[in-house]
Amino acid sequence: MNIVPRANFRDSRDIPAAMASRDPRELSFKDDGVVIDLRNCDFVWPSAALWCVVYSLLARKRESRVDLLVPSNLGVCSYLASIGFFDLLKKEQIAVDDRGIPQPRGQQYILPLTRFTATIEVDHLINSTYERLQQLGQGSANLYAIVSENFGELAMNAVQHAQSPIGAFGLIQFYTFAQGERFVCAVADGGIGVRKSLEKNPANVGRVPYDWVALEYATKERVTGTLDSHRGIGLFGVAEDMRKPERSLLFHSGIGSLMIEGLTPSDARRVNLFPGTLASMFIPT
């Protein structure tokens, strides 16, 4: 199976539906060879890099051989190398031919692509993120807390609720866009997804028939997949924080997507499959 994303690869929405529809979490997933072909990509967003990681590792769990073909664009390759993308995949026995790709100088990541599986690791990442932000001196002290705490909430959700056989992955970077400077925070896992997680609480059964409905519901106050009535505050808090001007949150689970962008109404829709859950935040400096 060859998976060929668009040149501007943001996430699984930029993969042809026929290629993206096969779910490597399913026992029925059988493919001797999976090729993720990035050769024509002129831009690979952090959320797209996380899709590649999650899909590749889940396919390896099904004993498929996975090859990642690196971008022909050397600048894109240099960026992916700088966040530890190629190294992480190679450690997981994904075939990556990254010879001759230079490591860039002046890296602007706050947290390189990092795998985590336990709450104690998340606590460490939150602390190290805060320290790294202070070292870089980008933004105010209040902003450091916003970035690290919101990232920590998403990461903790992945550890506690995803049931991911491959763990979870996080990335925080500082970017300069045409619209201004932004922190990009992304978390992804290969777990059961938001809808199935919510349905573990009998009170939610019947309320979340589709993935996109589940995402909308999950961002409401006091909604939880547990039986603890005191839970359901964290994700609601992240969503509310991202409703502030110039901030945004892309939430993608299964075939559902939810975009929260500043003061505009949230947009929930059906999209191509993400085999697990992805959350990506943009926060201005």
Image: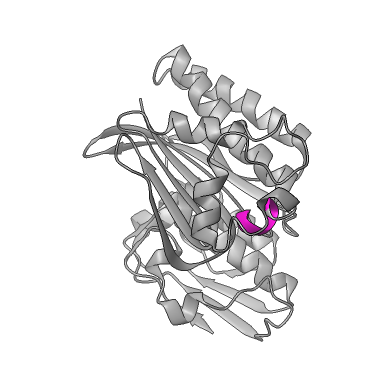
Q: Residue furthest top?
A: 141
Q: Is residue 209 above or below residue 261?
A: below
Kindly identify the residue that appears in the image at 38 percent across and 67 percent down: 14
Residue 270: percent from left, percent from top:
43, 65
Asked whether, in this view, residue 247 is left or right of residue 189, the answer is left
Q: In this view, does 41 lie above or below 149?
A: below
Residue 72: percent from left, percent from top:
36, 68
Q: In this view, does 228 lie above or below 140?
A: below
Kindly identify the residue that appears in the image at 59 percent across and 39 percent down: 154
Asked whether, in this view, residue 146 is left or right of residue 30, the answer is left
Whether 32 is among the magenta residues is no
Residue 211: percent from left, percent from top:
54, 61
Front position in the image: 33 or 209: 209
Residue 265: percent from left, percent from top:
32, 43
Front position in the image: 269 or 16: 269
Q: Which residue lies furthest to the left in this view?
A: 178
Residue 156 visible to an observer of this rendering:
yes
Quadrant the C terminus occupies:
top left
Asked whether, in this view, residue 2 is left or right of residue 247, the answer is right
Kindly identify the residue that appears in the image at 42 percent across and 69 percent down: 38
Front position in the image: 89 or 258: 258
How many numbered discs sit on the rendered protein? 0
- Range shown magenta: 193-198
The image's colour scheme reads one colour
Quadrant the N terminus occupies:
bottom right
Residue 102 visible to an observer of this rendering:
no
Whether 194 is among the magenta residues is yes
Q: Is most of the magenta stretch helix, strand or loop?
A: helix
Front position in the image: 65 or 270: 270
